[in-house]
Image (tube, rainbow, N blue to C red):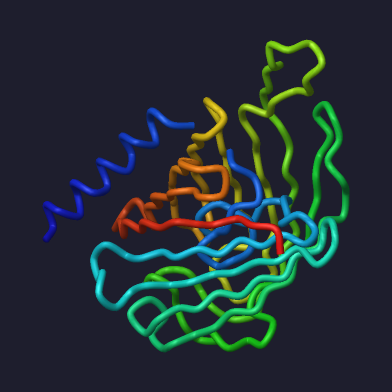
Amino acid sequence: MCWMRRGLVALTLCVAGVVGAVKAEPSLFGYTGLVFAPTADTVPRNRFNASWHVDTEFVDTSSSYTMAYGLQEGIEISVSRFPRAIAGASTTLLNLKVRIREPELGRNVQVAAGITDITDESKGRRFYGRVEGGTRAYLVLSAPLWQARRRRQDASDIHIVRGHLGFVAGRGRSNLFAALEAQLVRPLSIFGEVFDNDYHVGARLAVLPRVTLEGKVVNLRDPDVIIGVSYNQRW
């Protein structure tokens, strides 16, 4: 199985190398984000996304599910469900995120704050054997680092590379996290992050207007390969 896991890691990284950020897509914890790191994006008002992920090492027992809904523009609630193989016990997380500052043209920063696991159900547990559970509050800043303009003169700028920097208050081993995501072409994105002192990477491919395929590698030093799909729809 070791060679298979290494092959899957290599495949995910190769795909990431040729694909390029789809906004308002769920992290593994359910809130809008990358692998674990939240971004300042939120699900638009009266829209929802749902996702399914599975750890390729425990395909039969490791399916996790998330759903997020935009209550108002800039206010998002989300829920995620993890099995025993991922969290040590069946666990449900309830999350809330509020965007503090609206995005604008140019290099202005977008800011959001949120709470993960409001009910503290995951206290004392670890997700994927690495990430601490329990209630955690965070503040995240997202900003375009490099952008290119569409060919049509009446179109707005496209953010090609975005950076995310945040602070987490909770039981985790690190209070800071940072991430980069790059959109090389509109349906394809890659991203990497440092979260809880571990390195995680991933890639997304929007195969249909409402459907996105995902590949994520949790903890590059002892990798778990996660594959999944998400669906976006107006409520």
Q: Looking at the figure, which quarter contains the N terminus?
A: bottom left
Q: Looking at the figure, which quarter contains the C terminus?
A: bottom right
In the image, taking residue 16 as reference, residue 208 lies left or right, namely right
Q: Which residue is at 71% across, 32% downward?
A: 144
Image label count: 0
Image vertical order of residue 123 relative to residue 140, above or below:
below
- Nearer the observer, 71 or 31: 71
Q: Which residue is at 55% across, 52% downward?
A: 34
- Nearer the observer, 74 or 182: 74
Q: Residue 122, position in %: x, y?
A: 54, 84
In the image, taking residue 20 as reference, residue 134 lies left or right, namely right
Q: Residue 3, position in %: x, y?
A: 11, 52
Q: Which residue is at 65% across, 38% downward?
A: 163
Image vertical order of residue 226 relative to residue 104, above or below:
below
Residue 46: quarter of image: bottom right
Q: Which residue is at 44% across, 43% downward?
A: 203
Q: Residue 234, position in %: x, y?
A: 70, 58
Q: Residue 183, position in %: x, y?
A: 56, 31
